[in-house]
Image (cartoon, rainbow, N blue to C red):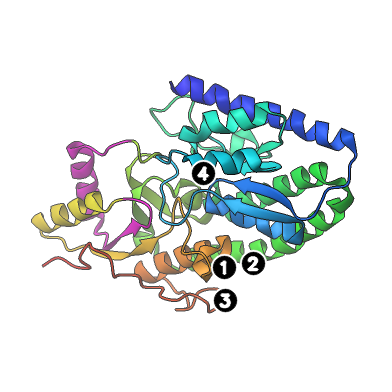
Amino acid sequence: MRNTTLLSCVLITAVGLVGCERHQAGGQLRGQPYRVTTTVAMVTDIVRQVAGDKAEVQGIIGEGVDPHLYKPTRNDIAALQQAEVVFYNGLLLEGKMADALARVASGGRPVHAVTELLDKSYLLQPAGRPGHVDPHVWMDVSAWSQAVEAVAQALGNFDPPNRAAYTENARRYGEKLSQLDAYVRRVVQSIPERQRVLVTAHDAFSYFGRAYGIEVRGIQGISTESEAGLEDINRLVSFLVEREIQAIFVESSVAEKNVRALIEGAAARGWTIRVGGLLYSDAMGPPGTYEGTYVGMLDHNATVIARALGGDAPAGGMTGSLRNPEWNLRLVPAERP
């Protein structure tokens, strides 16, 4: 089943590129705005930044929704079929949408993975999962900047008369991402070295950890389809107690039961752990908010992590726009007696 999904994703990219060439060869002037459909919100946001007013961009997978488990609805299928261009993350993040994306690509429409420009040597391969790579590349701002470039190239090929506009939009947005990358690096490095450990609900932060120098442990694997067993929980509890880790984090798109189990397990061994805050991993914040943008998502994550682990980060984040950088208001209790 997994091999079939992987093959589908390969076919999506191949057929999508053919479709793109077919549109370009036609040479027709595009009506504005044309329709673009995207999958996860992180992709939706960068496509909107690059497309500007040339396209109407519709995202399928919204806030708080886990893309690993998401199955497209009838309306989603219609949105994909009605789109003139489709963008998705790739790397099997949207595994249950592979067949739907392949069908759209086979109809001649351009279908693009925004990760298609990333060098294979950059990608992380989790132990015990041969043939699979970690899809959470947006956690490294420098990598997501390459995704922005992939979008600009794809839109330029689809709509050649506006290629310069897409290139300029991508350049200006890239400057914002460079500022974001520097901010994340600075505040994470301000955390005392012994406390520079990030424990979250699932393993979505490995690229973040590698890029910004923080050790990362996830309760579940890279996909939330994997289940954490009792042995996994106990092993991580031992790690937390031995390292005297004071804070762990919940995620907006992942159930909290395993985080609760860690807190209770540590309490049984006499060590108190608090919830450092809520992080955005596979989904961004609510639409219309700062945290509902890619820049706001990473600003929020870096600020919450740094402040919870003893680092130096302003309460309002990089731009002063964060609504609540503490985010200790989840179902998991902030502290255990």
Q: CA distance from mark 1 to mark 3?
A: 10 Å
Q: Nearer the viewer, residue 189 or 179?
A: 179
Q: Is residue 231 magenta?
A: yes
The residue identified by callout 1 is 183
Q: Are marks 1 and 4 in contact (CB under 8 Å)?
A: no
User: What residue sits 90% from the left and 39% below the top?
Assistant: 27
Q: Residues within 10 Å of mark 1 (few under 14, many from 20)?
A: some
**Labels 4 and 3 touching (C-beta < 8 A):** no
Left or right of 34 on screen, residue 180: left
Residue flagged by tag 3: what amino acid is it? Thr
Q: Earlier in the sequence, mark 1 or mark 3?
A: 1
Q: Nearer the viewer, residue 261 or 160?
A: 160
Whether tag 1 and tag 3 are in contact, CB under 8 A, the answer is: no
User: Percent from the top left, x then y, of residue 201?
Assistant: 32, 50
Mark 1 to mark 4 CA distance (whole Å): 39 Å
The dot on residue 75 is 4
| Mark with earlier residue (1, 4) | 4
The image quarter in which residue 25 lies: top right
The front one of 77 and 239 is: 77
Which of pointers 1 and 3 indicates the residue nearer the eye? 3
Q: Is label 1 or label 4 in front?
A: 4
Would residue 109 be found to the left or right of residue 129 on screen? right
Q: Secondary structure at mark 4?
A: helix
Identified by mark 4, the residue type is Asn
- Image depth: mark 4 or mark 3 in front: 4
Circle 3 Cα neighbour tier, 10 Å, few/some/many (<14 / 14–19 / ≥20): few
Secondary structure at numbered mark 1: helix
Q: Which residue is mark 3?
A: 319
Query: Start and end of the magenta stretch?
Result: 226-254
- Residue underneath mark 2: 179
- Position of residue 73 relative to residue 65, above or below, is above
